[in-house]
Image (cartoon, grey):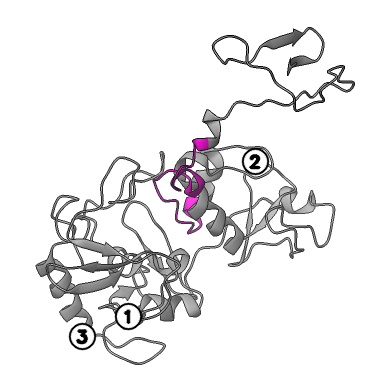
């Protein structure tokens, strides 16, 4: 990606990704296919695949004005494209002519892995000439960074997480448990395993971290052990985790806060003395429940 492109921000705070923040509305010209839909989908212009795997390739999006369909990450990570429009133009600021221009550039480049033309993502290491489609690269260990210039690395040149020897030696178990999935892992720097910057003895599966980030969003994504947010997010960003700038998935569901309107009406005292039982409540005048403040045990309904 060209350094003149305005697609990223500084590493801290989490970079803004067009179209993903909690306030921005999806442009009316775009169709975003829900993650639950896996069949009868149009193929991506860049990678020619129609898989709707949002954690790997980003949203599958169709611009109804131009008829162009892309995986968001295939578009975002393409090395020669520029985001010149506003967020409500084209595909989150990528205008039709810019997308077509990048597609045509890729037609001159053959993927190092599938050997088909249309490769638009290149390793950013200066002396490396590797180019590939996003799915081909990811299947072969490529690494992609979602901030600043949105750099991509081939398997040979991808950076490994920098971890001090003391932190590695401080891990007591040979095969500790990932606290997200509770399965064991090998505690050493690799493409599939990440170390938390805050908790010395905590190691995580990359896929587990990405799943958590995609679900929690920037506002709730944090260390699963100590709840560190800023340091944890920065370390994960530097190691290729995509953190969408959006509300958590559980807050985007219909009627997500409906239960907050329901008042708790069960007595939680160890010994309830109400003759009608713990679930009994009485209409006191206007219909409000009478609450009794128990000095030692908190509030209970009687």
Counting residues from the start of the chain, the first of labels 2 and 3 encountered is 3
SS category of the residue bearing label 3: loop
Q: Residues within 10 Å of mark 3 (few under 14, many from 20)?
A: some
Which of the two marks, 2 or 1, is nearer to us in this view? 1
- Residue 70 place in picture, x, y as percent: 28, 71
- Which stretch appears magenta? 237-258
Q: Nearer the viewer, mark 3 or mark 1?
A: 1
Classify 16 as above or below 269.
below
Percent of width and height locating residue 189: 65, 62
Residue 139 visible in the displayed image: yes
Check the picture and name the quadrant holding the C terminus.
top right
Q: Which residue is nearer to you in this view: 35 or 44? A: 35
Question: How dense is the environment of label 2, judged by Cα within 10 Å: few (below 14), some, or many (20 and up)?
Answer: some
Q: Is residue 47 left or right of residue 204?
A: left
Could you say where residue 58 lies in the image, as x and y percent from the top left?
39, 64
Q: Work out whether mark 2 precedes mark 1 in sequence or the reverse, and give the earlier one.
A: 1
Front residue (pair 204, 280)? 280
The stretch drawn in magenta includes residue 126: no
Q: Which mark is residue 285?
A: none
Magenta part, dominant SS? loop
**Secondary structure of residue under mark 1:** loop
Kindly identify which residue carries mark 1. 47
Q: Which residue is mark 3?
A: 107
- Residue placed most toward the observer, 87 or 154: 87
Q: Quadrant of residue 116?
A: bottom left
Q: Could you tell me which residue is drawn at 16 percent across and 74 percent down?
A: 67
Tell whether label 1 touches label 2 (CB within 8 Å): no
Q: Mark 2 highlights which residue?
A: 198
Q: Looking at the picture, how far across and down is residue 194, in whole percent?
A: 62, 57
- Residue 267 located left or right of residue 38: right
């Amino acid at each position: 990606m060209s350094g003149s492109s305005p697609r990223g921000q500084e590493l801290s705070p989490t970079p803004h990704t067009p179209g993903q923040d909690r306030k921005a509305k999806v442009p009316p010209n775009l169709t975003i296919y829900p993650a639950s839909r896996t069949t009868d989908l149009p193929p991506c212009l860049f990678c020619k695949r129609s898989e709707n795997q949002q954690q790997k390739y980003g949203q599958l999006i169709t611009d109804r004005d131009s008829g162009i369909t892309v995986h968001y990450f295939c578009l975002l990570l393409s090395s020669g494209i520029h985001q010149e429009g506003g967020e409500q133009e084209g595909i989150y600021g990528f205008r039709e002519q810019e997308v077509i221009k990048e597609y045509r550039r890729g037609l001159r480049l053959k993927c190092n892995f599938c050997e088909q033309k249309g490769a638009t993502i290149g390793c950013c290491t200066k002396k490396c000439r590797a180019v590939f489609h996003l799915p081909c690269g990811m299947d072969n260990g490529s690494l992609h960074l979602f901030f600043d210039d949105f750099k991509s690395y081939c398997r040979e040149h991808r950076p490994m997480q920098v971890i001090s020897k003391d932190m590695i030696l401080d891990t007591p178990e040979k095969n500790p448990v990932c606290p997200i999935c509770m399965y064991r892992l090998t505690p050493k720097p690799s493409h599939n395993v990440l170390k938390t910057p805050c908790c010395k003895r905590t190691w995580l599966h990359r896929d587990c971290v990405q799943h958590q980030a995609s679900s929690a969003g920037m506002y709730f994504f944090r260390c699963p052990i100590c709840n560190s947010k800023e340091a944890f997010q920065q370390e994960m960003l530097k190691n290729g985790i995509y953190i969408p700038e959006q509300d958590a998935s559980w807050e985007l569901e219909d009627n997500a806060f409906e239960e907050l309107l329901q008042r708790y009406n069960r007595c939680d005292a160890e010994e309830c003395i109400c003759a009608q039982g713990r679930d009994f409540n009485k209409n006191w005048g206007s219909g409000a429940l009478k609450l009794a403040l128990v000095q030692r045990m908190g509030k209970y309904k009687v």
